[in-house]
Image (cartoon, coloured by chain):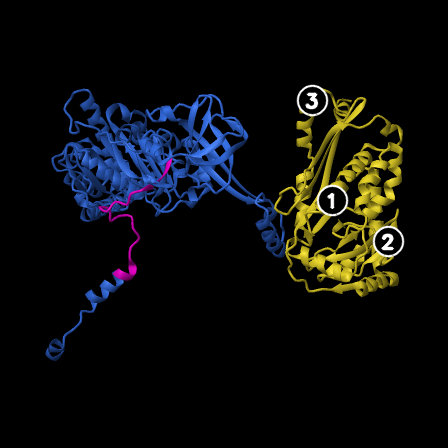
Chain colours: A blue, B yellow
């Protein structure tokens, strides 16, 4: 092993600081000896400082200090902080055992060898799948435990363009290859071109009979402050309507009765007429999402497939209602399966929630907050797991996020987002969190139960993914030219 | 505001007025003019020379009945490498020092200067230029005091080899030497106000205790403060130019970098002193400061 540094300052069992002769990058793995045995450490911060240049206050002095610093090798200090990943002996067996004592100050720090890292990060067994390579070691393949994703939940928290959708697509592909079931709640129609063999693209269907009058009002786009319209709809939407063979006719009939009733005051008549218009408009525009015959929304979701549920056509509230309906049904179905009753999904279901902050906001209860919280808490028992995907983690409900067993984090620049990540997982420290903004696309910190040890990973770019990319406006405009102004031949011109 | 503070700021204000008046005076302008006249602008050439710098540091702790002190002295190159074997001393200040009316600081300074002179003389054999932080003339002037603590003999022994050492330079940034301009305050004050370019003053010769010393001022980079330089030998302006050429390339804010390194490496900060105290087995004894804090 190559000796690269020396332990200095206050060492603790879980954390060391060391000086190095050459620069050592954040994300690198180093090794040092303790009385308990050899320990693997992850470098979480790397500082390079010229004492001389740190004290200058103007440009000219800086130029002079630069020259003087060149002459003094002691002036430049390379300083790293690293966190204990665990005793190597344990890590190689998949167990994280921390040393009970820190290394002696002055202990040599070695660069971990590629072979050792390969043994730790690469796993061929069935439940593990390859997702990329160690960021600082191109030759070390990193595997993740898909079983943990399907049981202990995962949060993919990264800034826009850092590879969230690529990672989700990669997990979808791997899940498909394992014959698993995944439902992607696709709020921005990002996954509509996902080229995975078992991918299915479905538009959600909802039976209005299963909604209460407020939910029905939301689905029909009646404004939340239109209390009169909502009141009239509530009056019209009674048990008879819900059980009527022709739901919409029955509902409209009740509204027409209100209009025609001589005892109805003028204002109520006008309001009922308006609600009738709204229903007609709603059915004309979004009628295909309502299915008054369907027993369960799950009928359109196929087990052992990647089901992409396109929510892009809905308002936030509508999408929340749909998600609440689907997730409640899925959880109930899986409960039935666990209890040996009739069920649609015989095996675990992974639910990926894109734009998760829209569905579980931190500052209020959404229409689907409860069911998402329930799945986060109890889903493991019934084989329902969540993959929360968000670029604004600080806007997520912390209680739900803290139930996530695994994390993929990248590119978060806002301090509140960084703090949130550190709050919900103790595997991303302040030092490591500080490196988040400097990560490039596809470079992520993978931490938690799905990896043997936390690591900075360059996630593989999935070829099947044609999603999440910025639109090529120039190319598309150029295509428009060809479409709109078709080149006319001389012959055609003569004919004109 | 307490009365004393009010008086304090009134006095400071009065001083400000006095200084303003002085700056407007004719004699002040004459001093500035003289500083300008003696200044010789110079365009330096970078010349690589082997440079060493000497400095010392000391610290002490007061205990009931004795003082524990630590001295470090070093001769270093700008690369932080030591040029000669460094000197360290940890001891108790001799009992007679306080009785002679000499403060412990002065005693340690005397001992540290002996080491500095010894190191400078040794380093001068391996280096083109040896820089020492301080003033040899000031040291020679203060020598008599050391008689009281029986340090004079040693002091003279270490001072002797410096005589006529052309490559040992004593450097001070905050000199109060008034021999050149003969103004109200030190020469360097007027030089810094009257000139801003790289340059020097012609050496003037002073004699003290049989040591002929050339005194001059140099500025190593534009807009930085000039330094007071003493060489315990007779030198001319060509020599001064060669000194600027040698130091100009590695000066930071007009100060030789080697001296900065020597200062940092020789200093005895409080945390290092704490460790020395522990190593000497004295950590359990209350220091005079602690007694004051309790009282």
Task: Determine the secondary structure under disc 2.
Answer: strand
> Which one is in front in this view, the residue at disc 2 or the one at disc 3?
2
> Marks 3 and 1, how far apart in space?
35 Å
Q: Residue at x 69, y 39 (%)?
A: B266
A248 vs A119: above or below? below
Q: Residue most toward the bottom? A: A494
| Residue bearing the label numbered 1 | B120
Question: Residue B230 appears at what percent x and percent y?
Answer: 79, 52
Q: For this view, does A29 lie left or right of residue A288?
A: right
Q: Chain of mark 1?
A: B
Please report the bounds of the magenta region as a residue range.
A455-475
Earlier sequence position, callout 1 versus callout 2: 1
Residues behind callouts 1 and 2 on a single chain: yes
Mark whose residue sits in front, 1 or 2? 1
Mark carried by residue B181: none
* Quadrant that contains the N terminus of chain B: top right
Per the picture, the main secondary structure of the magenta-coloured stretch is loop
Q: Which mark is residue B283?
A: 3
């Amino acid at each position: 092993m190559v000796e690269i540094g020396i332990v200095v300052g206050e060492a603790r069992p879980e954390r060391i600081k060391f000086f190095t002769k050459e620069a050592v990058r954040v994300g690198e793995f180093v090794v040092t000896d303790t009385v308990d045995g050899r320990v693997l450490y992850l470098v979480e911060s790397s500082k390079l400082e010229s004492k001389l240049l740190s004290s200058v206050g103007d440009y000219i002095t800086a130029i002079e200090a630069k020259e003087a610093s060149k002459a003094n090798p002691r002036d430049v200090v390379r300083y790293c902080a690293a966190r204990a990943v665990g005793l190597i002996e344990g890590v190689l067996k998949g167990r994280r055992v921390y040393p009970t004592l820190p290394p002696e100050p002055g202990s040599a720090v070695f660069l971990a060898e590629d072979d050792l890292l390969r043994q730790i990060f690469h796993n061929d067994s069935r439940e593990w799948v390859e997702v990329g390579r160690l960021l600082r070691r191109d030759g070390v393949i990193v595997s993740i435990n898909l079983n943990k994703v399907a049981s202990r939940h995962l949060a993919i928290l990264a800034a826009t363009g850092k590879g969230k959708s690529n990672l989700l697509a990669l997990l979808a592909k791997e899940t498909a290859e394992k014959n698993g079931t995944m439902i992607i709640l696709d709020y921005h129609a990002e996954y509509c071109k996902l080229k995975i063999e078992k991918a299915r693209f479905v538009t959600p269907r909802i039976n209005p009979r299963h909604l209460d009058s407020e939910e029905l009002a939301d689905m029909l786009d009646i404004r939340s402050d239109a209390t009169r319209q909502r009141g009239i709809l509530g009056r019209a939407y009674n048990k008879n309507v819900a059980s009527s063979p022709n739901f919409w006719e029955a509902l409209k009939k009740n509204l027409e009765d209100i209009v025609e009733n001589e005892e109805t005051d003028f204002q109520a008549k006008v309001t009922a007429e308006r609600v009738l218009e709204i229903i007609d408009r709603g059915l004309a525009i979004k009628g295909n999402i309502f299915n008054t015959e369907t027993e369960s929304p799950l009928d359109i979701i196929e087990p052992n497939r990647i089901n992409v549920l396109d929510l892009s056509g809905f308002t936030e509230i509508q999408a929340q209602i749909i998600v609440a309906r689907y997730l409640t049904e899925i959880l109930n179905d899986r409960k039935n399966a666990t209890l040996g009753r009739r069920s649609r999904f015989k095996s675990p279901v992974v639910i990926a929630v894109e734009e998760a902050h829209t569905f579980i906001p931190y500052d209020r209860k959404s229409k689907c907050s409860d069911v998402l919280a329930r799945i986060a808490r109890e889903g493991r028992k019934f084989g329902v797991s969540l993959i929360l995907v968000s670029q604004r983690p600080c806007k997520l409900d912390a209680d739900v996020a803290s139930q996530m067993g695994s994390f993929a984090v990248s590119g978060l620049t806002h301090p509140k987002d960084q703090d949130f990540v550190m709050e919900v997982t103790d595997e991303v420290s302040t030092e490591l969190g500080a490196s988040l903004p400097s990560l490039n696309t596809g470079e992520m910190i993978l931490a938690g139960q799905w990896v043997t040890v936390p690591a900075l990973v360059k996630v593989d770019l999935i070829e099947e993914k044609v999603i999440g990319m910025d639109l090529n406006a120039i190319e598309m405009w150029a295509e428009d030219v060809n479409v709109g102004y078709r080149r006319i031949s001389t012959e055609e011109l003569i004919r004109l | 505001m307490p009365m004393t503070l009010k008086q304090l700021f009134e006095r400071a204000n009065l001083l400000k007025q006095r200084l303003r008046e002085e700056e407007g005076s004719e004699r002040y302008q004459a001093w500035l003019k003289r500083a300008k006249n003696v200044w010789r602008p110079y365009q330096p050439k970078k010349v690589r020379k082997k440079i060493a710098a000497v400095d010392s540091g000391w610290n002490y702790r007061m205990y009931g009945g004795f003082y524990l002190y630590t001295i470090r002295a070093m001769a270093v190159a700008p690369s932080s490498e030591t040029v000669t074997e460094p000197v360290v001393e940890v001891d108790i200040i001799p009992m007679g020092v306080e009785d002679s009316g000499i403060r412990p600081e002065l005693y340690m300074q005397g001992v540290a200067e002996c080491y500095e002179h010894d190191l400078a003389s040794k380093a001068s054999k391996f280096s083109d230029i040896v820089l020492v932080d301080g003033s040899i003339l000031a040291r020679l002037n203060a020598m008599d005091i050391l008689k009281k603590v029986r340090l004079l003999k040693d002091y003279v022994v270490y001072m002797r080899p410096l005589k006529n050492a052309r490559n040992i330079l004593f450097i001070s940034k905050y000199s109060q030497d008034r021999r050149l301009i003969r103004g109200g305050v030190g020469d360097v004050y007027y030089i810094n106000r009257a000139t801003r370019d790289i340059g020097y003053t012609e050496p003037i010769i002073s004699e003290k205790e049989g040591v002929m010393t050339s005194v001059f001022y140099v500025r190593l980079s534009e807009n930085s403060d000039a330094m007071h330089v003493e060489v315990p030998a007779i030198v001319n302006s060509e020599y001064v130019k060669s000194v600027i050429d040698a130091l100009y390339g590695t000066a930071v804010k007009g100060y030789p970098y080697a001296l900065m390194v020597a200062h940092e490496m020789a200093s005895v900060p409080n945390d290092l002193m704490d460790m020395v105290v522990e190593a000497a087995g004295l950590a359990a004894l209350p220091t005079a400061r602690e007694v004051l804090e309790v009282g």
